[in-house]
Image: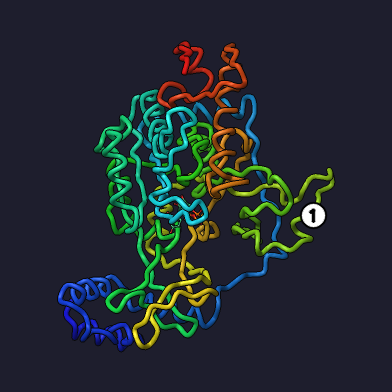
């Protein structure tokens, strides 16, 4: 892009202040700024400024009803597993990981997936995800292609981690990295913020940026070429997730669903998780912050919470549904943050209070567009223990304890007694459940 083109484009969307320090920039800084401007879509800038004027729309959730949530047991569970296993044997299942987040609450300097979580080996979060995918693909004799969304900030470090660990045993050609988009930050009056005279402040466009990035990168086309039907979606911070779980895949296929969600009972009425609700014939994810105290505390006839189930962001999508949705624009959500930025004189100001907006898209905003959605309950202790915070709830300490408790349950089921004081770790490629331990036997090592 040339200077004149950048100037015309920026003027059209009332953002030409971005070039205010042009004459002071070096040749390299000028080139870098132009290539940053080139990534900006003027229509999106106008949309951001407009969203800022109108505010994020928060639809009324007071009329929402609790969805019907399936609990699979006995014969129904066996049937779902059989269908899911067939899909896996036919190579129709892909794994899709969103790992572009900044992990600011954890305060870890690097991609969260590189965070060392193995209680004995200190293996990173990526290890547990990749080895589970490897185990399932070995069990069913077909590869499960693994699509990983990164962001500009962590893409190189993520790829390096996979290289360093030799792709954790996965065939390299089955791992597909793609990068999500970035949005410029804006001041309260809708002006793009600069964090250096030749640099625009930009941040990742949220996990909903997934759809545009899947399309742009060719990942969606790759899935189609490989004959993928069901796409298992998960987040980087939960090493307990049962990736490509046959029961969930089978349930999704049996229900002819386009978007299926695993849900678990909330730990308390106010737990900070999204709650899917039914409005007429459509479903929508209602964020915890949108729910009134009455909604949170509402009980059903049996005395249980009426809105009992929350979403830990474990989904199965129909590939064709993702393709349809990738062609549409998604709603933008505003986050008011402290953004270090330049004043008119070009001096960097580090604000002590929020001063600007970041824009994010959320993947669950496509839920109302699904022709059919389905909801499956699971037990939190078995499949969900995220690493969000450095300490306290949902921290590395609670996650490691939950991982080990699960492995101990498997060992006990397989008739192995383990001293409760000893640390436990199982390579997912060795066992994805207790039945593998029975089949493969166990070798107890001493530290
Ligand atoms: P979170 O909402 O927990 O955000 O992301 P985060 O960035 O990991 O952590 P904080 O809020 O800064 O502490 C949930 C999932 O969505 C991904 C994350 O990598 C994580 O797997 N994500 C989030 C993206 O891929 N891109 C984004 O822009 C945001």
Residue 28, image quadrant: bottom left
Q: Which residue is mark 1?
A: 298
* Residue 357 x/y as whole percent: 48, 74
Q: Decide which of 320, 418 is in the foreground and name it.
A: 418
Q: Decide which of 102, 208 is in the foreground and name it.
A: 102
* Residue 23 x/y as whole percent: 21, 86
* Residue 318 x/y as whole percent: 44, 47
Q: Residues within 10 Å of mark 1 (few under 14, many from 20)?
A: some
Q: In what element is the residue under mark 1?
A: loop
Relative to 364, 265 lies left or right: right
Q: Decide which of 184, 424 is in the foreground and name it.
A: 424
The residue under the point 67% across, 50% down is 67
Tally of numbered discs: 1
Q: Decide which of 151, 21 is in the foreground and name it.
A: 21
Q: Can the viewer see residue 124? A: yes
The relative height of residue 105 versus residue 393 in the rendered view (above or below) is below
Q: Which quadrant holds the N terminus? A: bottom left
Q: Can the viewer see residue 87? A: no
The relative height of residue 407 versus residue 66 in the rendered view (above or below) is above
The residue under the point 41% across, 53% down is 322
Relative to 78, 85 lies left or right: left
């Amino acid at each position: 892009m040339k200077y004149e083109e950048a100037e015309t484009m920026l003027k059209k969307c009332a953002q030409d202040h971005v070039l205010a320090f042009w004459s002071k920039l070096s040749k390299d800084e000028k080139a870098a700024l132009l290539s940053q401007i080139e990534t900006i879509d003027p229509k999106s800038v106008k949309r951001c400024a407009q969203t800022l004027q109108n505010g994020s729309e928060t639809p009324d959730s007071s009329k929402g009803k609790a969805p019907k949530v399936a609990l699979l047991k006995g014969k129904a569970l066996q049937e779902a597993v059989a269908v899911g296993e067939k899909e896996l044997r036919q190579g129709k299942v892909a794994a899709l990981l969103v790992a572009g987040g900044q992990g600011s609450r954890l305060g870890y300097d690097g991609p969260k997936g590189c965070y060392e979580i193995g209680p004995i080996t200190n293996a990173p979060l990526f290890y547990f995800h990749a080895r589970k995918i490897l185990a399932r693909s070995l069990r069913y004799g077909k590869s499960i292609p693994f699509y990983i969304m990164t962001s500009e900030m962590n893409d190189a470090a993520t790829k390096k981690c996979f290289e360093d660990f030799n792709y954790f045993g996965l065939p390299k050609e089955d791992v597909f990295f793609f990068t999500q988009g970035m949005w410029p930050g804006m001041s309260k009056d809708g002006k793009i913020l600069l964090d250096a005279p030749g640099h625009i402040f930009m941040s990742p466009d949220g996990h909903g940026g997934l759809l545009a990035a899947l399309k742009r990168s060719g990942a969606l086309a790759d899935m189609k070429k490989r004959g993928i039907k069901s796409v298992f979606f998960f987040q980087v911070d939960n090493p307990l997730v049962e990736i490509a779980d046959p029961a969930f895949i089978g349930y999704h296929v049996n229900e002819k669903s386009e978007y299926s969600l695993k849900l678990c009972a909330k730990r308390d009425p106010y737990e900070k998780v999204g709650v899917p609700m039914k409005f007429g014939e459509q479903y929508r994810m209602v964020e915890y912050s949108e729910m009134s105290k009455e909604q949170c505390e509402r009980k059903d006839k049996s005395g249980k919470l009426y809105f009992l189930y929350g979403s830990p962001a474990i989904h199965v999508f129909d590939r064709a549904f993702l393709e349809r949705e990738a062609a549409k624009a998604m709603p933008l959500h505003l986050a008011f943050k402290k953004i270090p930025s330049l004043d008119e004189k070009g001096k960097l100001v580090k604000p002590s209070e929020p001063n600007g907006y970041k824009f994010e898209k959320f993947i669950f905003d496509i839920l109302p567009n699904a022709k059919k959605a389905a909801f499956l309950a699971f037990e939190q202790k078995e499949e969900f223990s995220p690493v969000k915070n450095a300490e306290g709830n949902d921290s590395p300490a609670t996650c490691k304890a939950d991982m080990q408790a699960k492995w101990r349950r498997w060992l006990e089921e397989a008739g192995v007694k383990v001293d409760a004081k000893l640390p436990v770790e199982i390579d997912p490629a060795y066992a994805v459940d207790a039945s593998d331990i029975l089949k493969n036997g166990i070798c107890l090592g001493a530290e």
